[in-house]
Amino acid sequence: MTNKAANAVVGKPAVAGGIFVAPLGTAIPTDETTALGAGFESVGYLTDAGFTRSRKPNTDKKKAWGGDPLVIINTGTDRTAKFGFAEYLNKKVQELVYGDAQVEETAATEGAGRKLAIVDKEIALPHKVWVIQMFSGPAVGRLIFPDAQISDFDDITYKDDDIAAFPVTLTQFADSTGAFSYEYWTDGVPLPAAG
């Protein structure tokens, strides 16, 4: 097989949104283009750090007397993803960070803008279905985590020359088939019509 530059992709978020979430158990898409079901909600813009996916095996290396390697024992694999929510005033983002019950939104009126009231309590954040949608030129891709939970937060910084954002880490869990994720792509280049 020869080199083909068209096989390289950049990860630009889909125009409709880069990340969507739904309650755990929501039916997941099985291709890269079928419209998402009504249960999915966009999380809005991410920061320009993009979306980073990580797969790190945990290994225990056994050696012989004298230091020669004998065997590597895999004790599991950590599957995570990191990104930053850029829309600080997005109710869905605040719910994902603090929990649905900890966020209250009041609609705008003639005399006041829309309001958010957020309470930070020690709670276990829910497992959800996460869908990441990307494109690269004509190529379209979709990455699906059927069960993932926000498991870590980086610092939130408030300053006058950058946005306040929520950098988070997702931890992935296996679904009923043992799969941690599903990924679908099309290069977007159909064959020419015959004849």
Image: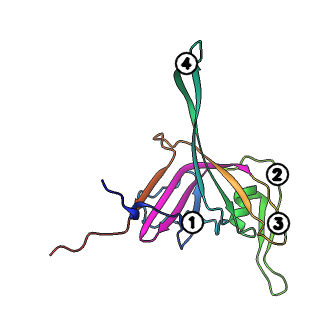
Q: Residue furthest bottom?
A: 110
What residue would you read off at disc 3?
117
- Looking at marks 4 and 3 on the same chain, the residue that comes earlier in the sequence is marked by 4
Q: Secondary structure at mark 2?
A: loop
Closer to the camera in the image, 185 or 72: 72
Q: Residue at x 36, y 61 (%)?
A: 4
- Looking at marks 4 and 1 on the same chain, the residue that comes earlier in the sequence is marked by 1
- Looking at marks 1 and 3 on the same chain, the residue that comes earlier in the sequence is marked by 1
Kind of residue sitting beneath label 3: Ala
Residue 132 lies within the magenta run: yes
Which of the numbered marks, if any, corresponds to residue 121?
A: 2
Of badges 4 and 2, the one in the foreground is 4
- Circles 4 and 3: CB atoms closer than 8 Å: no
Q: Secondary structure at mark 3?
A: strand
Q: CA distance from mark 4 to mark 3?
A: 60 Å
- Circles 4 and 2: CB atoms closer than 8 Å: no
What residue would you read off at disc 1?
18
Closer to the camera in the image, 63 or 145: 63
- Looking at marks 2 and 1 on the same chain, the residue that comes earlier in the sequence is marked by 1
Q: Residue 71: x, y in percent?
A: 51, 22
Kind of residue sitting beneath label 1: Gly
Q: Residue 129: x, y in percent?
A: 56, 54
- Circles 1 and 3: CB atoms closer than 8 Å: no
Mark 4: few, some, or many residues within 10 Å (few <14, many ≥20)? few
Mark 3: few, some, or many residues within 10 Å (few <14, many ≥20)? few
Residue 51 sits in which quadrant? bottom right
Numbered range of the magenta stretch: 128-153
